[in-house]
Structures are given as C-alpha cells and as structure tokens.
C-alpha cells in the first residue's frame, strides 16, 4: 500500500537533512541555498516495532520484514508558491500526491545557515506555508464552484449539495483557516475528495532544533506548540543534523553508544516515523512462521478480507476465514501449538475488524 508522507517547509529548515536520516538513503542533496531540492525525492522509512523483535526471538525465522512508510522530500516553498513562484506549482502538485504532511519548522539559530526570510521565526514560517497552501486550495475550490454554480441554481440536487459544501470551504479558507480544521461530515469529505485539497491533509509539526535543545525543546518550540493548539496537531522535537549522523553509523551498537553519549533515550527519527504512521491512521498486523515474520500495514478499521488482500488480491477474493492470535497471547504461550492448546486462537469471518498487533493466518479458496 503506497502511503506517503510529504516533508514540507521553507527552504533551509532541514527538510532534506531529515529526509536523508528518515530514508537512510543520502539521496537528497542538502546545501546552504534555497531550492537545493528541485525534483521530489522519495524514500522508504522502516517503521520500528519492538513486537517484531519479540516474535523473531521466539520463532527464529529465516527472514524478518518491517512495515514501511513512503517519505517524499518536497522542495522548499516560498511566498508566492500558490502563484507559481519558486517553481511553486510543481512543488504543490507533489504535496497533492501525499496522504499526510510533515511540516518542518526551523527552531534553531545558526548564522552559517541562510534563512530565506533573513531571520529565524517559526511562527512566521508556518504562516507562510499555511497561506500558500490555503490560497492554492481556494483557487481549486472556487474553480470547481464556478463550474457547478449554474447547475445548482437550476435545481440539480447533487450540484446544489456540492455547491453548499464548496461555499463553506471557500469562506473558511478566506478567513485564513485550513480545511482540516472544519467540521466536515463523511458526505462532505466525499464531495471534496476529487479536489485533492492540500489543507485537508493531516499534519505533524516537526521542530528542527539544535543539539543543545534536545530532548525538551526551547522557547521557539514552545511558540509553535502554543500556535497549533487549536488545530489539534502534534508537535515533535528532532535534531535533523544529529539524526543524519546516527543514520551514517551502520552498526546498531554504535548507534546505541552514540545515543547514550548524547543522553538521548531514543532516536527522534523513530518517534517521527511512528507519529507519521499514526497520522495516516494506520495500524499493523503480523504473519508469523519459520520462513518469515512480517508486519503488514492496514488502515485502522480494516476488516479481515481486506487485510488479507494486502498480501495478495486472491486472499481477499477467495477469503474463507482468518485464524487470529492476539500478540500478548503469543508472547505468553511462546508458540502457536501452545496457543491453540490454551484455546486462545480465534477463527474469524468476513466481518472481523482487525486489531493492531493481531497475528493472522488466512484460509482462502480461489
């Protein structure tokens, strides 16, 4: 499943450095000038999950596969991006392809790193990005509204319903608000879905701080926290430069020693990937056997046949039943045989809603 998080922000706030650490690829050029990233970079971030390690320790499989999130490094936006300034149209199109936004704001002072606005002010930076995305959404919504307005006025019920939703969205955007802060029904969201609005996407604010501000942040971070309270968005503190240094260490023991020396309990990177995973409304189920222990990604609320379809479409098409073991039960009884003997394996049908951490075996016939 191609779930994507797009990293956005002004130029030189640390997006590409963060991308390099997230994808551990080094593919994104990081340099001290605007528009260093012109083409989008796409990387794969492995979702850390200690449950995989626990299952692997018990089963000793030939292979272990984590679940992933696709990360898109989108070039720095500037004032006027919604009108095409700074290659804005191209960059905004990249955001449309993403399911969620990681909005990086600079919360560190460094005279050696140029700021496109000539000073460090995360609230101003956030407002610039918000405004450009809102203006683009306003243009999109108004274009659609103008197309269906006449049909709505002639009594077309479907057109009138769409026009009513669009009028509310346009008014909300004109007031300087993002669509994600609106109270929208499921029907409203269906009307808006084909528009691929930028500001309806869920967002996580990533405060890029200096090494000395880890792990709790600084005064600039506090300003960001206060500013986004009304959005209900999460704020994460990370030092992209430190994360990139850690990513360059291929040995896990070396990484652990580095973290210990820095007094950091856990990589901010791991926190960020988990937060992005949650932001997308995703959860994990497992398949577990001697050949492979694997984590699979599904949206929260997925039923068993659709979960099976993530593995192969035939599994969903010919679904018969799912044999389900709860993760805690597997850890307690240590193997599948003991779980069955304890009566802790459940047989579930087509209406079963998969829980996070379920260990599943599918029966199907095509």
Image (cartoon, rainbow, N blue to C red):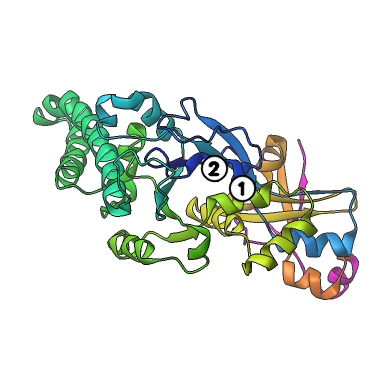
Report the magenta residues as a range. Answer: 337-366
Residue picked out by circle 2: 17
The quarter of the picture where the C terminus appears is top right
Near-viewer residue (226 or 6): 226
Q: Is residue 207 above or below residue 20?
A: below
Q: Is residue 329 left or right of residue 82?
A: right
| Residue 302 visible here | no
- Is disc 1 placed on a helix, strand or loop? helix
Residue at left offset 40%, top offset 66%: 218
Residue picked out by circle 1: 244
Residue 360 shown in magenta = yes
Which badge, 1 or 2, is on the more N-terminal residue? Answer: 2
Residue at left offset 48%, top offset 57%: 210
Total number of numbered labels? 2
The image position of residue 6, as x and y in percent, is: 47, 40
- Marks 1/2: CA–CA distance: 7 Å
Estimate how packed mark 2 is, as few (under 14), some (14 to 19) or many (20 or more) residues with alpha carbons within 10 Å.
many
Q: Is residue 221 above or below residue 125?
A: below
Q: Is residue 57 above or below residue 123?
A: below
Near-viewer residue (55 or 318): 55
The image position of residue 55, as x and y in percent, is: 81, 62
Residue 342 shown in magenta = yes
The image position of residue 181, as x and y in percent, is: 28, 54
- Is disc 2 placed on a helix, strand or loop? helix
Residue at left offset 17%, top offset 30%: 156
């Amino acid at each position: 499943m191609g779930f994507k998080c797009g990293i956005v922000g002004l130029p030189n706030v640390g997006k590409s450095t963060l991308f390099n650490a997230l994808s551990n690829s080094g593919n994104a050029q990081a340099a001290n000038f605007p528009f260093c990233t012109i083409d989008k970079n796409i990387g794969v971030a492995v979702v850390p999950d200690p449950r995989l390690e626990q299952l692997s320790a018990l089963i000793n499989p030939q292979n272990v596969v984590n679940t992933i999130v696709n990360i898109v490094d989108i070039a720095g936006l500037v004032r006027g991006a919604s009108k095409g300034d700074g290659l804005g149209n191209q960059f905004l199109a990249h955001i449309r392809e993403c399911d969620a936004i990681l909005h990086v704001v600079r919360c560190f002072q460094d005279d050696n790193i140029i700021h496109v606005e000539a000073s460090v002010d995360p609230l101003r930076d956030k407002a610039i990005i918000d405004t450009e995305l809102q203006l683009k959404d306003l243009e999109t919504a108004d274009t659609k509204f103008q197309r269906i307005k006449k049909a709505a006025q002639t009594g077309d019920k479907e057109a009138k319903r769409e026009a009513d939703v669009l009028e509310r969205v346009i008014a909300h955007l004109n007031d300087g608000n993002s669509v994600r802060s609106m109270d929208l029904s499921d029907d409203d969201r269906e009307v808006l879905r084909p528009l691929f609005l930028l500001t309806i996407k869920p967002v996580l604010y990533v405060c890029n701080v200096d090494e000395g501000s880890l792990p709790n942040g600084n005064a600039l971070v506090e300003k960001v926290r206060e500013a986004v309270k009304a959005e209900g968005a999460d704020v994460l503190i990370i030092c992209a430069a430190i994360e990139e240094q850690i990513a360059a260490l291929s040995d896990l023991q070396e990484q652990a020693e580095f973290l210990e020396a820095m007094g950091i309990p856990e990589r901010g990177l791991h926190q960020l990937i988990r937060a992005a995973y949650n932001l997308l409304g995703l959860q994990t189920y497992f398949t577990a056997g001697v050949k492979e222990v694997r984590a699979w990604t599904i949206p929260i609320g997925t039923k068993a046949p659709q979960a099976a379809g993530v593995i192969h479409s035939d599994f969903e098409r010919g679904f018969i039943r799912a044999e389900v073991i709860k993760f805690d039960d597997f850890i307690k009884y240590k193997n599948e045989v003991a779980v069955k003997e304890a009566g802790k394996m459940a047989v579930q049908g087509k209406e079963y809603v998969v829980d996070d951490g379920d260990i599943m075996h599918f029966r199907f016939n095509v």
